[in-house]
Amino acid sequence: MGLGLVPPVLPMICFVGYSFFMQTLFTPAQLADPDIAESNRILRSCVHCGMCTATCPTFLLRGDELDSPRGRIYLIKDMLESGRPASELEVRHVDRCLSCLSCMTTCPSGVHYMHLVDHARAYIEKTYQRPAAERFLRRLLSAVLPYPGRFRLALIGASLARPFARLMPGQSVMAARLRAMLSLAPAHVPSPSAIERRGVFPAQGERRGRVGLLTGCAQQVLAPSINEATIRLLTRMGIEVVLTKGQGCCGALDHHMGHHDPAMRLARANIAAWSAEIEGEGLDAIVVNASGCGTTLKDYGFMFREEAAPWREKAEKVAGLASDISEVLTRFGYAPSRPAPGLTVAYHAACSLQHGQKITAEPKALLARAGFQVKEPAEGHICCGSAGTYNLMQPEIAGQLKERKLGNLARTGAAVIAAGNIGCLTQLGDGAMPAIHTVELLDWMAGGPEPEGIAKARELA
């Protein structure tokens, strides 16, 4: 019958050497579709060993095989292979996936789960009719979150309604989602930053490099101080920072909701904007200080692999230049100018950074170089529950993961949480410890202003 709760959709397998590899039964006509061909390659790399289940957050909480990467792989295989529309079963379990990619770090056979589940999400959106209220909510998120002006207006309205979130009636999934949206809204929406204008921020002293900066969408509204700190720090290090005209949201929010065409439009605009700069004065890197965006930018080459020239080549170039801020600071030799602050930092490794980009050592090394004592929480590989729009669409699971993460962070005895992703900072920021972006702490120790939250951290120290 299968493993655990898996229905009779278990794949045929074949013995190759000492490993069991999944056998697929796609037709030649199906394999003519490049997305199916890629998913077929990924599926056939799976040895169904189950090691991924040990590090999957949803399997950890629910204990359901279908809420593990292995279970989802079985469901996705059956859905794609049969060519039928997605059913409620596949939709339910794929929707519960955080795309945290912890399974990719754990997998011994190199299954590229990210590309497989992204294909599944797009296939679901094409073939499955969601309830009307859910369709409306997903379209609303797609129409608001990637656009800073719209998002700022929405947050202002949500902040006014935030005190009444718990009074919202109803036990339905939609009521829970609306309560989650209001509870995540900040009590105060920051004013627009002066750096939102596009232009060039010259290096201080001799120019050592020239980089573009992804200004992002949600982050520049929720925490404009992150981009401000990034520009201050880089220019102080002799790096010219360019905010290109025409850039915007990286496309991740739409991409992970299965909205393929809107995601590609946003990505194409960024590629065009940065390509003009690359072909002009040139760029040494495209700096990203929101790791969820960085994982997507670094995947532009794959996303545009079937596009006609010159888009494919331009996308590959942009993806090759995309760098997390911690990578750039390491490359150019970050050094503090202030004495050690005497604070202990609990470093929260964002999933998109540690699993998506495989960046693990650099942020911790930079924080230590800046004079912080760095501690890591137990279960550091487990997601905090933010995951893009996940904490809005799956508030129950996201809430459980949040409390688990906050508990582990508190047990480090640290006074402040450092993280490199705005989603994680928003998810964890209402706990006892202040949550501050890593680059803001590094900028402070290199001559920048004291980040908001440090006064509270000193009280906890």
Image: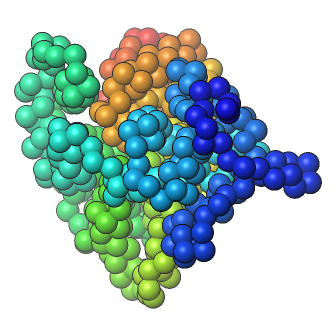
In the figure, is residue 16 to the left or right of 156? right
| Residue at position x 65%, y 42% in the image | 10
Question: Which residue lies at the image location 82% right of the left edge and 48% below the top edge?
Answer: 20
Q: Quadrant of residue 108?
A: top right
Q: Which residue is drawn at 33% across and 40% down?
A: 389
Q: Judge left or right: residue 179 versus residue 156.
A: right
Q: What is the image's colouring? A: rainbow
- 219 lies above or below 50: below
Reply above or below: 284 against 281.
Answer: above
Above or below — where is 36 with respect to 82?
below
Residue in the foreground of this view, choosing between 363 and 111: 111
**Residue 346's spot in the image, x, y percent?**
54, 24
Res. 313 in view: yes
Picture layout, residue 277 above or below residue 296: below
Looking at the picture, tell me which residue is in the foreground, 137 or 359: 137
Q: In this view, does 173 lie to the left or right of 361?
A: left
Where's residue 216, x and y in %? 31, 55
Residue at 52 percent across and 28 percent down: it is 58
* Residue 344 appears in the picture as rendered: no
- Quadrant where the N terminus sits is top right
Q: Kindly indicate the quadrant of the structure image that contains residue 2.
A: top right
Count of number-bearing discs = 0
* Residue 27 screen position, x and y as percent: 60, 69
Q: Where is residue 282 in the image (x, y as percent from the top left)?
A: 45, 80
